[in-house]
Image: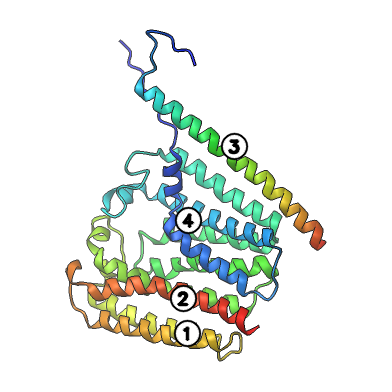
């Protein structure tokens, strides 16, 4: 008797949604929105809304392509084993079609609603995350997060360009702040999930260079990032609200990074400072961008 | 809805149909939303003269 293979289940929308990494997307949407709101020219509401929607969809597409390419890796790590593809709830081809469709749609809609420069930047950010970070760097070098961090730094720049049509110094500095923020943020996480990365053979900094070297680099990047974050104020690009908030936040960030540098634990349960830095780094970025918008709107 | 006696759908077929219905409903809402969005973008572009 010939057995027929049962038809595969159609994808559940919840799995497609999970494929877009919604938690990461919230930070992307927020920084993009702040980039747009901080711009000197304000587009009509519907155009601004569409620009943010396109950035969110583009980030979702990049996240989905990342999960499509890394499903083998995700299956080996506790933190990611329950994602839709490695858990078997979603097949790879559906994920690929969904991701490519979503990414193409977001770029085309961005061009139609705003301008070609914003669309090119959006396409570049998706391609950078997928091709440079996911495919090229992540499995090859401990600098994966440093260079790959550029992908996550695009949203405020795209938000600004969607509003103005131009690339200026302030959004470039915002790009630099997120670029410098990424290594301490991800390395703090990778210290307490090191065994996961080691099991999956991902050359994250703690796996390749060890705990002490990673902690020193976290501190170094935190100092450079805190200085870069304040820079727009003395350069006259922002007012005292942004400058004051960023200076205080930067000092707190450095204090957390010093606590990490002084810690010599190798057991995740002893890594309180690393966990605190990771949590604070997310709050840091939210407050920094909120202060930028408050500065623009209250002091304008 | 009439049910044919002796031809009860298998549980997995019901799941497949439920998901297809859910997909169709979401697609319809998204397409409707897209049409409205394009209309509003067009209005905004005409208003701002771009």
Q: Residue B28 carries which label?
A: 3
Choose the circle earlier in sequence order: 4 or 2.
4
Q: Could you tell me which chain the residue with mark 1 belongs to? A: A
Q: For the residues tagged 1 and 3, is the chain the same?
A: no
Residue A240 relative to residue A66: left or right? right
- Alpha-carbon distance for marks 4 and 1? 34 Å
- Check disc 4 and report the residue beneath it: A130
Q: What residue appears at the point 20 percent right and 67 percent down from the top-left corner?
A: A268
Q: Please state the horizontal and vertical placement of residue A106, each as a whole percent of the image.
A: 60, 52
Mark 4 or 2: in front is: 2
Q: Do labels 4 and 1 share a chain?
A: yes
Q: Give the alpha-carbon distance from disc 1 to disc 3, as whole Å.
A: 45 Å
Seen in the image, is A204 located left or right of residue A98? left
How many angstroms separate mark 3 from mark 2 (CA)?
38 Å
In the figure, residue B4 lies in which quadrant? top left
Asked whether residue A208 is in view, the answer is no
Considering depth in this image, is B2 or B19 the residue closer to the camera?
B2
Q: Which of marks 1 and 2 is nearer the N terminus?
A: 1
* A88 relative to A190, above or below: above
| Residue at the image position 41 percent from the left and 30 percent from the top | A9
Residue named by callout 1: A245
Q: Which of marks 4 and 1 is in front?
A: 1
Using the rendered image of the protein, determine whether residue A221 is visible from the camera's viewpoint: yes
Answer with the quarter of the image where residue A49 lies.
bottom right
Q: Name the residue under label 2.
A: A287
């Amino acid at each position: 008797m010939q057995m027929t293979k049962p038809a595969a289940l159609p994808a559940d929308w919840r799995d497609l949604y999970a494929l877009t990494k919604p938690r990461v997307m919230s930070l992307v949407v927020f920084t993009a929105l702040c980039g747009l709101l901080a711009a000197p020219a304000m587009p009509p509401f519907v155009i601004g809304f569409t620009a943010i929607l396109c950035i969110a969809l583009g980030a979702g597409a990049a996240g989905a392509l990342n999960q499509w390419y890394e499903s083998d890796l995700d299956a080996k790590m506790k933190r990611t084993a329950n994602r839709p593809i490695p858990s078997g709830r979603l097949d790879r081809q559906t994920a690929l079609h969904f991701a490519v469709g979503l990414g193409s749609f977001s770029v085309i809609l961005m061009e139609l609603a705003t301008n070609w420069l914003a669309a090119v930047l959006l396409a570049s950010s998706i391609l950078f995350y997928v091709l440079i970070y996911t495919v090229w760097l992540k499995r090859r070098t401990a600098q994966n997060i440093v260079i790959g961090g550029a992908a996550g730094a695009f949203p405020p720049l795209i938000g600004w360009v969607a509003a103005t049509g131009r690339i200026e110094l302030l959004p470039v500095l915002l790009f630099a702040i997120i670029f410098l923020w990424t290594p301490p943020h991800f390395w703090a996480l990778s210290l307490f999930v090191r065994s996961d990365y080691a099991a999956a053979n991902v050359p994250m900094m703690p796996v390749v260079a060890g705990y002490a070297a990673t902690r020193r680099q976290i501190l170094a990047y935190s100092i450079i990032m805190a200085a870069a974050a304040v820079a727009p104020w003395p350069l006259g690009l922002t007012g005292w609200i942004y400058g004051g908030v960023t200076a205080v936040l930067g000092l707190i960030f450095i204090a957390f990074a010093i606590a990490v540098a002084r810690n010599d634990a190798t057991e995740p349960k002893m890594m309180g400072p690393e966990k605190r830095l990771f949590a604070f780094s997310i709050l840091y970025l939210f407050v920094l961008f909120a202060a930028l918008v408050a500065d623009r709107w209250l002091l304008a | 809805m009439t049910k044919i006696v002796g031809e009860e759908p298998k549980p997995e077929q019901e799941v497949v149909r439920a998901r297809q219905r859910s997909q169709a409903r979401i697609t319809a809402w998204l397409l409707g939303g897209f049409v409205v969005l394009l209309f509003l973008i067009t209005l905004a572009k005409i208003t701002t003269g771009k």
